[in-house]
Amino acid sequence: MRIIALFISISFMILFAVHDTIGTPRPSSSHDSAPILVCGAGHGGLLAAARLAAAGHHVILFEKKEESRLGWDWHDNFLARSFHDAGLKDPEWNDFIRVNDFTFISPDGNYRITTEIPLQNREIAMDRKTLIGMLVRHARESGVDIRWKSEVSGPVIEDGIVTGVIVNGIKQYGSLVIDSAGIDSPVRRGLPPSYEITREIGRGERINVYRAYYSLNKAVPYDEREYRVYLGINGMRGIAWVRTIDGACDVLIGSIDPLDTATMETIMGKIRTENRQVDDTLIRGGSFASIPLRRPLDLFVGHNYAAIGDAAAMTVPVIGSGIENSFKAAVFLSETVLSLGKPGSGSGIAYHRQDLWDYQYRFYRDRGARLCGLDRVKYFLLTAPWDDLNDLFRKGLLQASDLEKPLLGESIEISTGSMILRFFKGWYRPDLLLPMKSMLDDSREIMECALAIPPRWDEKKITRWRKELNHPFTTYSTALKGKTP
């Protein structure tokens, strides 16, 4: 009897050991019972997971952090209508504040342009942890299986096809992998070459950010409504801002070049010189991060794979904000998946890229094309010599509407009459006006090219479209990696 009992015990040990090694059992060729796997608790990933789970799909979301540590310690700006567009309940009034008009400051600090955005079009600022908390609760209530402290290290590839992901060293199989793992997603980086999806988002395509909240020196006169945005402060290729929020000074420093502690402290010294209300005491934040600062990827779907949010570079190229874009992408992705019904059978492909293509098509038509055009604006602002930008401010050649539209993810449109007036103002600097006009023309052409995205999967047409879309950025990317203006 002891021998039999020992045999049974060993059998159970082997069984559990095998289960722990393989994770989710390898599904049958039909994939009918295989779950949808979401990698990362980003805004788009959480919302897409919730919508799919609510419709009856088995959805598992893997997040490497603990729930209590989720979300950056800062506020995010986005349009309040994003909740309605995504089918979410509006937040409570005490969960957000209205963003004030922006005051842009020239690189030399001598000239200012203040926007006048109508109240109904202004963004709201919401604590990221509060927002993420809302999305996590919504996902749970919708039936998503959220697994914390579950780090995804890459995709599972079989016969050149994504069939799952590796979580904490264990293979987890699924019918579809939704990549919400951020700018440096290990899933996207590990995709097979045949997927032809950009693996790395490199220098010139990301902004390195320092974000912190400092105590407010109330003994110093200041306007709590002012939202100062600095272009090229202290010669930095990037932006910085200072505003008052929740009784503290919210400071952002963003550079397309490497941003270390020494550089940050130098910029902070300059900021404090011009904003004496910013005290030395750190209240919260004080962290560094990298955010995509480029147009959306030209391809972000493949067999059994779809990227969303920062993993697909769905941010506004001028400022790096992308919550509204991620919400819309989650709607498009979930609707595309639900329209396909049960996943296909055989060949290991549950969701073909040609079926998932409608998700990318809808995103590009709705907002991706505008973001491509704004990427050209970004290159202009970050590569123009500082003296040229100062002249744009000084002579009124750069106006408030030119700056507020990119902040809202909208394309810049200048009427013929306005352009003529600007030529009269800057007649002595044709070397400045012509590049500005060229930038606007290029931006419009790039947006039109992006809008011409093929509506259905056709490999030859899509390859040609991607080549035409990326062609202008070859030169711009080289310029961004060059010397500081």
Image (spheres, rainbow, N blue to C red):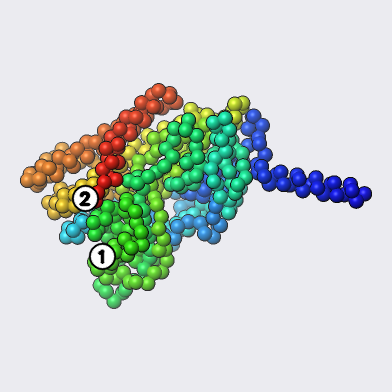
Residue 248: image quadrant is bottom left
* Residue 483 in view (yes/no): yes
Which residue is denoted by mark 2 in the rendering? 485
Disc 2: CA contacts within 10 A as few (<14), some (14-19) or many (>=20)? some
Q: Is residue 427 above or below residue 209?
A: above
Q: Is residue 186 above or below residue 225?
A: above
Tell me the kind of residue under disc 2: Pro
Which residue is denoted by mark 1 in the rendering? 270
Residue 115: image quadrant is bottom left
Tag 1 or tag 2, which sits nearer the N-term? Answer: 1
The secondary element bearing badge 1 is classed as: helix
- Residue 380 at what x, y percent from top left? 24, 44
Drawn side of residue 198 relative to residue 171, left or right: left
Disc 1: CA contacts within 10 A as few (<14), some (14-19) or many (>=20)? few
What's the residue at 35%, 41% (across, down)? Answer: 295
The secondary element bearing badge 2 is classed as: loop
